[in-house]
Structure formats: C-alpha cells, structure tokens
Image (cartoon, grey):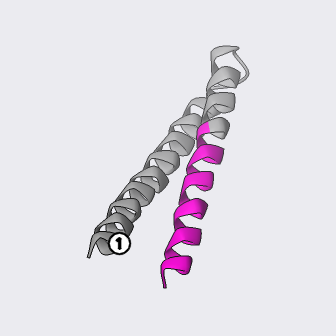
Amino acid sequence: MTQDKDSLLKRYKSTAKRYDEKGRREWAYAKNDLGGEHYAKARDAFDRAKRNQDKADQLEKEIKRKKKS
C-alpha cells in the first residue's frame, strides 16, 4: 500500500511541476503582448499546480504519520 502512495505522491509532485512550468510560459506570453487569453491560461495552470502540490503535501504528511506508527 505504501508503494501505491509513494507513486501517487511522485505523480502529484511531477504534475504540479509541469503545470508550474506551463503557467510560467503562459505568463511570459501574456507579458509579451501575445494575447490576453494567456493570462487566463497562466492563472489556470498556476491554480492546478497549487492544487496538485497541496495534495502532494497532504499525502506526504499522511505517509510520514503512518511510518511513525
């Protein structure tokens, strides 16, 4: 069971990293006058990155708590 949670944790972290990269790219597009829709895409990507990072943090705490028990 820990194996499943470890792989899920890795997936959440890598997904958060990917969305953060996408958000930064979209933000750069928006700042360079390539269209206003890039602001919305950047905000969405950053929101998704935050949600995935929050899930990863919560799961990491749960794994640590179970290992102590």
Q: Badge 1 is on which residue?
A: 67
Q: Mark 1 falls on what kind of element?
A: helix
Residue sitting at x 69%, y 30% = 25
Which amino acid, by three-letter code, is at mark 1? Lys
Question: As rendered, which of 27 and 18 lies closer to the eye?
Answer: 18
Expressed as whole percent of the image width and height from the top left, the position of residue 34 reads: 73, 21
Highlighted range, magenta = 1-20
Residue 43 falls left or right of residue 30: left
Residue sitting at x 62%, y 53% = 14
Residue sitting at x 40%, y 61% = 60
Expressed as whole percent of the image width and height from the top left, the position of residue 45 reads: 56, 43
The C terminus sits in image quarter:
bottom left
Displayed quadrant of residue 3: bottom right
Q: Is residue 53 above or below residue 24?
A: below
Question: As rendered, which of 2 and 31 lies closer to the eye?
Answer: 2
Residue 21 falls left or right of residue 67: right
Q: Is residue 9 above or below residue 35?
A: below
Q: Is residue 3 above or below residue 22?
A: below
Displayed quadrant of residue 36: top right
Would residue 30 be counted in the magenta stretch?
no
State the predominant SS element of the stretch in magenta: helix
Residue furthest front as drawn: 68
Residue furthest top as drawn: 32
